[in-house]
Image: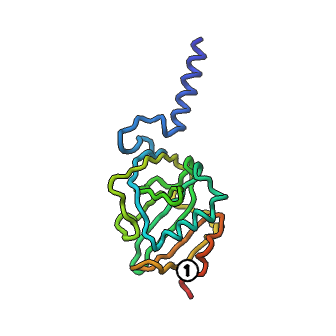
Amino acid sequence: MEIKNVIVLVCFGALLSLSCNGQKQSTNISTDSSNCFDKKLPEYQISSCISNLLESVVKSNSQFYDQKKYFYSLTLKKGDNQKYLNITPEEWHSATNMDYTGILKVRGVTFLCRGDFDKDSLFKKESSTFVRVKLKQSKDSADMLPFFTEPSLDGVFSDCKGLPIYVEVYTKGKILGFEKKLHHMNE
């Protein structure tokens, strides 16, 4: 009888260590574990000048990325002469990054945001909307793309006011309708 109890306790402990849900939560933010992410993120709206791009990413990849299993990681960085926008699909249970600070919903699909987006005119925070997000971190290093991965879309996007935006989208599906809207740096 004691051996069965020990086995049950060991199995239960292992399940808790594999799940982000087994952690004691505060009402608003974060777990104690470095490989789990459980936060309420503020929801943002995207500027109309770039909304078509995000909608095309979702539409062109709906057959490849089930929204229950995947989200899109959206990273925005501001340089001296342009902005850099990177979009990559990630699995909820094997996320590469954990430093997300905002969320967008496009056609019902989740984009988790990181980088300089919160001070950018392309994004507007919804005043009272927060969405709870749970992620489990991948064992792979953060911000590492395989060397053999080619972007499905890349180039400079100039449809928005302000600095041009260098866009890289790493998805299985080709982003339809934007090949001719982007130009490459050496053109």
Q: Position of residue 92 (x, y in %)?
A: 55, 49
Compared to residue 143, the image places residue 15 above or below, namely above
**Viewed as shown, does residue 155 lie left or right of 41?**
right
Residue 101, by quadrant, is bottom left
The answer to which of 144 and 65 lies nearer the viewer is: 65
Q: Position of residue 140 (x, y in %)?
A: 57, 53
Question: In the current view of this chain or complex, which residue is farthest to the top?
Answer: 1
Q: Which residue is label 1 attached to?
A: 182
Q: Position of residue 132 (x, y in %)?
A: 43, 46
Q: Position of residue 38 (x, y in %)?
A: 44, 45
Residue occupying image coordinates x 54% and y 55%: 71
Report how many numbered discs are placed on residues in the image.
1
Element at label 1: loop
**Viewed as shown, does residue 104 lie left or right of 94?**
left
Residue occupying image coordinates x 56% and y 19%: 6
Residue 88, by quadrant, is bottom right
Compared to residue 78, the image places residue 8 above or below, namely above
If the image is split into quadrants, where does the C terminus sit? bottom right
Q: Amino acid at mark 1?
A: Leu
